[in-house]
Amino acid sequence: MSSRIVVKIGSSSLTTEEGGLNLDSVAFFAAELAALRGAGHEVLLVTSGAVAAGFREIGYESRPKLLHEKQAAAALGQALLMRAYQNALAEHRLKAAQILLTRTDFANRKRMNNANMTISELLKQGIIPIINENDTVSIDELKFGDNDTLSALVANLVRAQQLIILTDTDGLYTADPRKSPDATRYEEIEEITEEIYGMAGGAGTSVGTGGMRSKIDAAKIATRGGVPVFIGRADAAGDLLLAYEHQGKGTYFATQLSSLPMKKQWLGFMSSPLGRIIVDEGAEEALLHGGHSLLPVGIKRLEGSFHAGDVVEVLNMNRERLGRGIVNYDEEQLQAVIGLPSSRVFELIGDVHRLEVIHRDEWITLK
Ligand SMILES: Nc1ncnc2c1ncn2[C@@H]1O[C@H](COP(=O)(O)OP(=O)(O)O)[C@@H](O)[C@H]1O
Ligand SMILES: N[C@@H](CCC(=O)OP(=O)(O)O)C(=O)O
């Protein structure tokens, strides 16, 4: 059966430690993608490597740290990266198109739908969409930074059957295998727990960005959206197809039994919260375990400036993120009623459109 597969390739798989694009690697991955296509699947590629490919060419000694230097390197490197992929895929009679996205594109549902329609049309025409973050215009605080999260959002957006995250390591180990040679590998993970997070470290090379931690974040987003994930390595001919067929060199993450509806996925992973609501222990319990809505009585403090209908983040008193929701009050209106029981809220603001500050149906738990 034909599947829609999102493949993510990290900088560490495409470039040398010193920077610069490794054209042999690009040729290898192009052949692997062609094999997936040859097996009848629809293929989307999320690829990193623009900064790593561009910084040497610009003349920087090492991967730049400053945002504008990274952006300059990406602007040059992205063109090199696309040219390399287009040339390599042409060897297999395949065409590739470039799509550059930012986090704000996902936060705006119209832009997100447009991107989705463009991707669908490209796939229909037999073209491989090649996606990267639009580094030149991304603002630091809103950057994906690594492409792991981007690949998960894309996989959910296009309702992929599988997300394959390729890296330089054959899966998730009990500790970073570069530092702990005794670490052992996981074959399958049913649920991403705190313990799993605890094992994942940062990037192992100077060109990679997110390390295993950001890959686990990505696996969480994708699996909650109903997309199973493989994290691992493809370094011999046929490995990518094997990864899809559940025989890959890496770790498989199972999907959640019930996948989140698109509305909640958007709320949790794509939206941009405009404010924060800090709640007490009772409200935390009600939201996380009681299945209740958030009421004014449980609120301690507000931060940021928001209006009814905006997305806000909810934190507990230790500033741990509990989740996100759509707020039913303007910030000023809410400020006047925080900590008050519902009867008082009605007395104070008669025209409140909904008593709940965040209704259960417009809430997603992220803790
Ligand atoms: N528990 C772990 N299991 C496997 N790899 C880990 C773990 N913790 C940290 N890593 C590191 O994550 C690195 C891969 O991430 P990264 O360098 O960001 O690659 P990419 O550029 O492919 O995204 C590996 O090289 C490895 O050193
Ligand atoms: N958009 C950036 C991605 C940065 C990056 O290094 O990501 P990754 O290799 O996925 O950890 C680029 O193309 O250089």
Image: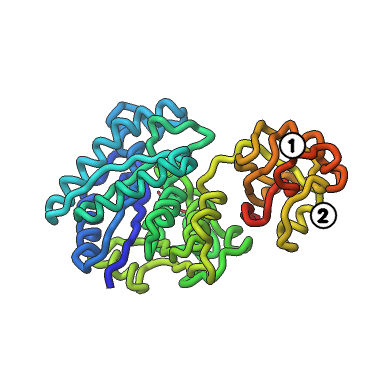
**Measuring 59% from the left and 40% from the top, which residue is drawn there?**
273
Q: Residue at x 73, y 63 (%)?
A: 289
Report the residue at 86% width, 47% height from top: 343
How would you rate the neighbour count of disc 1 (Cα within 10 Å): few for under 14, some for 14-19, many for 20 or more? some
- Extreme residue toward the front, this view: 351
Instruction: Between residue 234 and residue 246, name the one nearer to us.
Output: 246
Give the CA distance from mark 2 to mark 1: 17 Å
Q: Mark 2 points at which residue?
A: 282
Image coordinates for residue 143, horizontal then vertical, percent: 48, 38
Is the distance from the Cβ of mark 2 to the nearest ligand 1 atom less than 8 Å?
no
Quarter containing ligand 2?
Answer: top left
Q: How is colour applied across the structure in the image?
A: rainbow
Question: Which percent across, then down, holds residue 21?
Answer: 27, 42
Check disc 2 and report its element: helix, strand or loop: helix
| Residue at the disc numbered 1 | 302
Q: Is residue 305 above or below residue 48?
A: above
- Give the amino acid type for the residue marked by disc 2 in the picture: Gly
